[in-house]
Amino acid sequence: MTTTVYIWRSFSGGTKTSKAEGAHSSLARLGHALGGLGHVAMQVCDDYISWWPPEYAGKRYSLCLSPQEDTDRIGRKPDRSIRIKNLNEEEMLRQWAKFSGKSFNDLDLNCCSVTAYLLAQGWTESFDRPGKAIKRYWEMMSHPVRAYWAVLRFGIREVTIHSPGEVEEFAEWLTEVT
């Protein structure tokens, strides 16, 4: 199967629903002041994962259920779609189910950090598939400096990725190593 990551680099003034959603969000206010923030979402099997600040008081988060719903909310199509093969999508969906009780947080539980975390889980767990681990290990070891840099850059910090550009870079790297 293939996982698709959708990237909107910036909103340039906010989303169509910016007045209704996350008005209390300090990062949203800062983003609007700076000219807008981006968004990241992903398609894993039949599940579309798009994590937003809450639209209404008392809610923990808001979701979009399709790429078209995100496109409508943001007002344009994604800047980029990246298709990644050979991730463990079952594990990604198991990890996504664990987020149902958590609340959106501007700093460490936002669309970018959630997407990066799920991608990292899918990549790490994909090594359990017979034959894949040996092939990837050999490919990585053929470029030890690159492998070391990748582990430092992405492997230990997937939960600290906070921008669409960083998710885009991480997804690009995953297309090379999967």
Image (cartoon, rainbow, N blue to C red):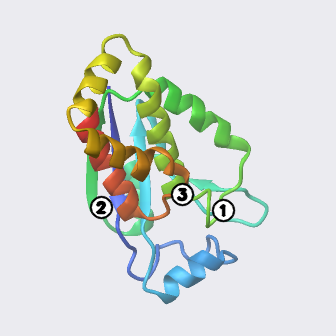
Q: Dot 1, how many residues are within 10 Å of its Cα: few (below 14), some (14-19), or many (20+)? A: some
In the displayed structure, 134 sits above or below 107; it is: above
Q: Tell me the kind of residue under disc 2.
A: Lys
Q: Is residue 132 left or right of residue 37?
A: left
Question: Which mark is nearer the camera, 1 or 3?
Answer: 3
Specify which label sits upstream in the sequence, 1 or 3. Answer: 1
Give the SS element for disc 2.
loop
Instruction: Tell me, yes or no, whether the two marked residues, 2 and 1, touch with CB atoms within 8 Å.
Output: no
In the depicted view, which residue is nearer to us: 159 or 76? Answer: 159
Q: Is residue 19 visible?
A: no
* Residue 96 - label: none
Residue 152 appears at what percent x and percent y? Answer: 42, 49
Give the SS element for disc 1.
loop
Check the image and name the residue furthest to the bottom: 33
Q: Tell me the kind of residue under disc 1.
A: Asn
| Residue named by callout 3 | 160
Residue 139 appears at what percent x and percent y? Answer: 22, 29
Residue 168 appears at what percent x and percent y? Answer: 33, 56
| Residue named by callout 1 | 105
Q: Is residue 173 left or right of residue 75?
A: left
Residue 60 appears at what percent x and percent y? Answer: 72, 56
Residue at figure coordinates x 66%, y 74% from the top left: 25
Q: Is residue 102 left or right of residue 10?
A: right
Q: Is residue 105 visible?
A: yes
Question: Which mark is nearer the camera, 2 or 3?
Answer: 3
Tell me the quarter of the picture where residue 106 sits: bottom right
Question: Could you tell me which quadrant the N terminus lies in?
Answer: top left
| Residue named by callout 2 | 77
Specify which label sits upstream in the sequence, 2 or 1. Answer: 2
Residue at figure coordinates x 61%, y 66% from the top left: 107
Question: Could you tell me which quadrant the C terminus lies in?
Answer: top left
